[in-house]
Structures are given as structure tokens and as C-alpha cells.
Amino acid sequence: MNVRICPHPLSGLIAAPSSKSEAHRLLICAALSDQQTYIHINSTSEDIEATVGCLQALGAEITQSEGVLKVIPIKNAPDTPLLDCRESGSTLRFLLPVASALCEQVSFTGSGRLPERPIGELLTEMEQHGVSSASQKLPLTTEGFLRPGEYKLPGNISSQYITGLLLALPLLEGDSQLTITSPLQSAAYVDITLNVLSRFGVHPKIQRDTQDHLVNCRISGSTLHSPGTVSVDGDWSNAAFFLAAGALCGMVSVTGLDVQSPQGDKRILDLLQSFGAKVEIQREKITVSPAPLHGQEIDIAPIPDLLPVLAAVAANSEGITTFFNGSRLRLKESDRLASTAAMIRSLGGTVQELSDKIVVQGTSLTGGNVDGCHDHRIVMAAAIAALCCTNNVIITGFEAINKSYPHFFKDYKTLGGEVYVL
């Protein structure tokens, strides 16, 4: 399905959706803990539904009512479960080791671009610890139980591999050590995992490098203890779209965001200020207002999910913005270096795509037709970029937003956006 956007400034107040990253981890820990957990959440998504479905297939009981997910933990996992991860990379990479800690044989499937996304390094390391698989791509079936021991993973492929092991190793009888063999990218996502584990009583002994990134941790087999009731923080990754809108064309305020959150995408505030936008942090809300914007250089490796929306800001900033260290973005729901560059070009902007970077020249955007590339973040970024176009914008495949932020366009309209389903 397609939408037409008529450029109109956004302004007003909305609540941040619940953090998808934190919700995945809370659900998994709740399903593995000693007693039931109530998770307060103000929004879900297709990715969260994928994790819920897989945990139910493993034997957890999960029900939702009035913004609360009730999780009754797994008591007896089935012998040969089938886990459909849909299009969720987090679901697949987190549950590969977790399910193998619980079941001797597990089948995994998925859809969209997920079968193309890498999992080989994780499967290879699992094979060294009792788990084999005839394939390194979906669909696949694992054989054997995961065993404790010495684990080594690169830090420059996917932090999700590391999270999967951090969630699984406490389930094993015995001590394990996890060593990161190369500089850890997207380190904040690992910190989210450690934060959630601590809320369930698991405290690995960790060693960090000079940049405060995890390099080594020791994990003993232990029981996860439910805190009873937990709340999911606001999502900085998705709130970033409307904070960016405030920088471009109107005063936008977002509630429900914690500036002390371990989420790395809270850097959106610093980056918008570096572009020149006005940012006001109050206890109950964060407000961003427009001001003259200018280009900058941005290392996108720690914050890959912010590239599309930051590119929209860059296209409306004076001068050149370079986004570098972006090679891993080619392995997302779309090739995000290519799809982000294509989005800017489709709207009349100027951008150069290189092997691991894109360079955006600030200019006036005219509008046009944007291919959403079945990528939720491209669709939402195009909607924000449309605010400053001189003509209407048509975005194809807008339903991709259901992956992470199903009510994005509802919030967009609440702030004054003009959106029409075609």
C-alpha cells in the first residue's frame, strides 16, 4: 500500500512508543524466569509479536490486556519446536542460543530479507559447544544442547550475537566465558541486555575496554528471578523521527524518554544540536525546535538505525554531511546505505554512495516517489523528509512501519501531518 504526503509542518506533543529493543529482552528474560512477570508496554509491533510467538512455541504463556503483557515462564519446553521469526533479526539471533539451551532440536524459519541476513559466526561458535546445523541460513534445524565453556565472537558483525549468548549462558549448568575478539560496534545494545539481565538478578562479571565497551564476561549458571512487574522504556530509535521533525520545521515535544537510558540512539539529541537545532530537556518531555542547520561528519557504526532519519536532516542542512563506518547497514531490512541514498535522490536531493559511507549535500528537496524498500526506517524517514519538500511525496509499501512502529502515521497526523492512503 502507498501513501501520499502533502508537506506541512509538524508541531505538538506525542508519547514515545515502547522500546522494541528492551521489549525483546524483557520478554525473553520473563519467559526464562522463576515466576510470572507483568510487562507494561504502550505499543507492540510485528517484531515483538514474532518474539512472543517464538516464546509461546517454546512453552511460555503470554497474554496481553490493556497495555500489560502477562508472561508465565517456560516450565517444560517441547521436544522439537518450530520458531517462526518472521522478519525479526533480533528474534532469530537472540533465540538461536536460548532455544538450544532448552531443546535438543529446534527448527527456525523466517521471511522477507531475514534468510539473507548473517548468522554464520554465531552458528559456528555454537557448533563448538554442542549445537550443529546443516545450514547457516534459514530455514534451519539445530541439533544438540548448548554447553557451557569458552565462547569467542567478533564485535564488528552483530551485537545481537552477543546478546543471544548473554541471555542463554545463565541457563546452562556451569561457568562460561564470553570474549569479544574485535572492537564492539553497537555496544549500547549489549548494555541494554546487561541492564535487563540485572533486573532479573543476573550479574555477569564483566571487563570493559577504555571506551567502556564490553570485551570479556564470565557467566555462571543461575536462576532468573522475576521482578514481578516491569515497564518498557520509551524508544529513542523511533522517537528520533519526530525529534528530527522538530529540527526541520516545527516545535515537537516527546514524552516518555529517559535520558539515562542505555539506549545508544539517545545520541539523536546531541546530533540534532550539532546540526544546529534547539533542544530543551525537561523532566516530563524533550522538545526540539528548528534553527539554521549545517552539515557535519557522523560515525554511524554505533547508531545504525539513525542513518535514514539523519540523512533526511542532512539533506535540509547547509553544506555536506558524511556518514561513515556504515558497511554493516547493507545487512539490514534493506541495504540501508543504498536505500537511504535512493530515498534522498528520489526527493530531488544530492547524495553520493560509497562502499561504507554516504555523503549528503544539503539542498532544497522537491518531492517525488520514494520506494519504501520494505524497510520501516526508510518509510518513516521519507515521511520526515517530505515535510520540507516543495511538492507532494508518495511512499510505496508504507505498511513496513508495522515492523516497529505501527501507529507512526497516527502520531504523524496528531502533530499536523497530512497523510492520505492511496
Image (cartoon, rainbow, N blue to C red):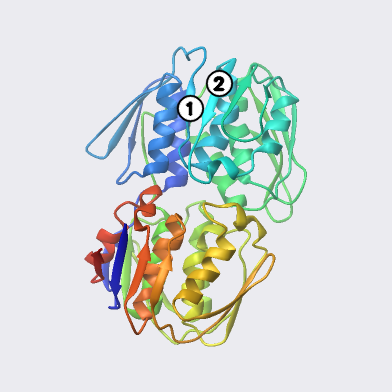
The residue drawn where x is 64% and y is 43% is 118
Quadrant assignment for the C terminus: bottom left
- Along the line of sight, the residue nearer the viewer: 329 or 270: 329
Query: Is residue 378 toward the left or the right of residue 155 in the image?
Result: left
Res 83 label: 1
The residue drawn where x is 69% and y is 37% is 120
The residue drawn where x is 40% and y is 83% is 366
**Image x and y of residue 257, in percent:** 38, 57
Crowding at mark 1 (Cα within 10 Å: few <14, some 14-19, many 20+) = many
Secondary element at tag 2? strand
Q: Amino acid at mark 2?
A: Val
- Along the line of sight, the residue nearer the viewer: 84 or 228: 84
Q: Measure how far apart labels 1 and 2 are at the Cα level.
A: 8 Å
Q: Are marks 1 and 2 in contact (CB under 8 Å)?
A: yes
Quadrant assignment for the N terminus: bottom left
**Image x and y of residue 390, in percent:** 35, 85
Vertical placement of residue 43 versus 52, above or below: below
Going from N to C along the chain, the mark reached first, 1 or 2, is: 1
Query: Is residue 185 toward the left or the right of residue 378 in the image?
Result: right
Secondary element at tag 1? strand
Q: Can the viewer see residue 236 in this picture?
A: no
Res 96 label: none
**Image x and y of residue 355, in percent:** 69, 66
Vertical placement of residue 119 versus 34, above or below: below
Query: Is residue 229 toward the left or the right of residue 25 in the image?
Result: left
Crowding at mark 2 (Cα within 10 Å: few <14, some 14-19, many 20+) = many
Please state the total of marks drawn on the protein image. Answer: 2
Q: Can the viewer see residue 161 in this picture?
A: yes
Vertical placement of residue 345 versus 222, above or below: below
Q: Amino acid at mark 1?
A: Leu
Res 106 label: 2
